[in-house]
Amino acid sequence: MYKRIMVALDQSFMTKRVLETAIELAKSTGARVAICHAIDETVLAQRDVAMMLPNSVGKTEARLRLGAQGFVDQAAETARAAGVETETRIIESEQKHVSDMLIQAAAEWHADLLVVGTHGMRGVERFFVGSVAERLVRKGRRSLLLVRGEDPVD
């Protein structure tokens, strides 16, 4: 069925659940896994930010990369400990939306399936923030597994 599963992690409350889902699916199908994290540099690339913090943008980008690498390395160790062949990918762009970066990374890695979490935003929050998962559904050409977050108890 699936031979190459890319899992996109974003350091949110969903990370553990999304990773566990991808690992279980990979174990059941014998698939390889690429753990992917997207660094969104669009805010840092804005002219106003660069002018206000001329010496800090490069340092901030370096810190983001270092933190992201540690994060995906830790997730990869979890997958390897479960017996899944795993590699990592850090993707970044100053111009592209996270969804576009993920679509491109999945295509370049020849992923059969992309696994992502959805935070379940609704209403005004979704309108202003947007949804990476929603954009992936609309724009992506690969199979996509959306892992839902837990609904808060009312």
Image (tube, rainbow, N blue to C red):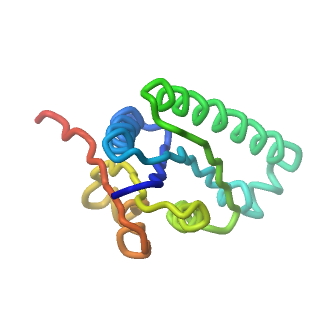
Residue farthest along the left direction in this orientation? 154
Closest to the observer: 139 or 125?
139
Whole-percent x and y of residue 65?
71, 41
Q: Is residue 3 above or below residue 30?
A: below
Q: Is residue 43 above or below residue 66?
A: below
Dividing the picture into quadrants, the one containing residue 151 is: top left
Whole-percent x and y of residue 137?
35, 69
Q: Residue at x 58, y 36 (%)?
A: 72
94 horizontally vs 131: left or right: right
143 horizontally vs 111: left or right: left
Q: Residue at x 36, y 65 (%)?
A: 143
Residue farthest along the top direction in this orientation? 81
Whole-percent x and y of residue 112?
43, 62
> Quadrant of the image for the N terminus?
bottom left
Q: Residue at x 59, y 51 (%)?
A: 38
Dividing the picture into quadrants, the one containing residue 100 is: bottom right
122 horizontally vs 3: left or right: left
